[in-house]
Image (spheres, helix red, strand yellow):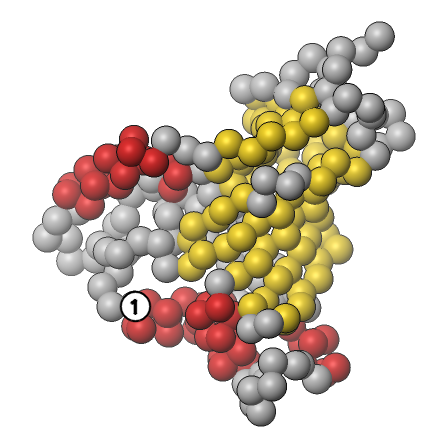
Amino acid sequence: MRRSGLAMLCAAGLLAARTGTASAHPHVFVDTGIEVIFDAQGRASALRIRWHYDDLFSLLIMEDRGFDADFDGVLTDQESAALQGFDMGWDPGFAGDTYALSGVSPLILSAPQEWTADYVDGRIASTHVRQIEPPVLLSEQSLIVQVYDPGFYTAYHIDPATVLTGAAAGCSAQAFEPDLATADAILQAAIDEQAGSADVEGDFPAIGAAYSEEVRVTCPPAS
């Protein structure tokens, strides 16, 4: 997760300090919801991504911002307004930990738009929209949406109940999980390779893709 902004950086630093050695990946856990939005021509035109952060990371954000000082789990209107977009200050080149493909061909996703954030039951949930540029028809190729942090600092779990908004009849979505045995072997090899490194965190290999979950959206052939 590479998102600029003082709150994100402070929370990441606090989290690293509280979790001990940096070699224990991941540090942040996010439940992820995916909505695929179709346009009037039946093309997949946008993704709405929901990030539901784990309770520890949410607590660190609250502490860093000085929110919910009375610990009643309810933000004031001013705090709620200040929370909006807290995780949307992305560094240049950051892919948003979301990757879309048409078949095997990568698709371009816009910068985040229409973001929201809320704090409920001790956890922060945020949403944002990313346009698919250009929109794609799914009658010949499936749409694949992968969610992962290349550095594996953040672990994402996809909600299998993908929402298809405006899709034609017969379109469907299915979530897939990685082969954990294979992913764990890749992770162990990466850790072994970094043994003795003075900066395990900074030099940690980009093995997050091995743990990527994905959603595949298919639509019937055009008649």
Looking at this view, name the residue that lies furthest to the left: 196
Residue drawn where x is 26% and y is 56% of the image: 24
> What is the crowding at mark 1: few (fewer than 14 residues within 10 Å), some, or many (at least 20)?
few
Residue drawn where x is 89% and y is 30% of the image: 40
Where is residue 98 shown, x and y percent of the image?
55, 42
Looking at this view, is 163 or 147 the one in front? Answer: 163
| Residue 48 horizontal side relative to residue 69, left or right | right
Reply above or below: 136 against 27: above
Looking at this view, name the residue that lies furthest to the right: 40
- Local secondary structure at mark 1: loop
Residue drawn where x is 62% and y is 47% of the image: 33
| Residue 174 horizontal side relative to residue 221, left or right | left
The part of the image, by quadrant, that contains residue 109 is: top right
Looking at this view, name the residue that lies furthest to the bottom: 70
Reply above or below: 193 against 220: below
Looking at this view, is 170 or 32 the one in front? Answer: 170
Looking at this view, is 160 or 155 the one in front? Answer: 160
Where is residue 118 shown, x and y percent of the image?
67, 68
Where is residue 155 shown, x and y percent of the image?
43, 50
Can you see residue 170?
Answer: yes
Residue type pointed to by label 1: Thr
Q: Which residue is mark 1?
A: 19
Can you see residue 47?
Answer: no
| Residue 13 horizontal side relative to residue 98, left or right | left
Where is residue 176 shown, x and y percent of the image?
51, 32
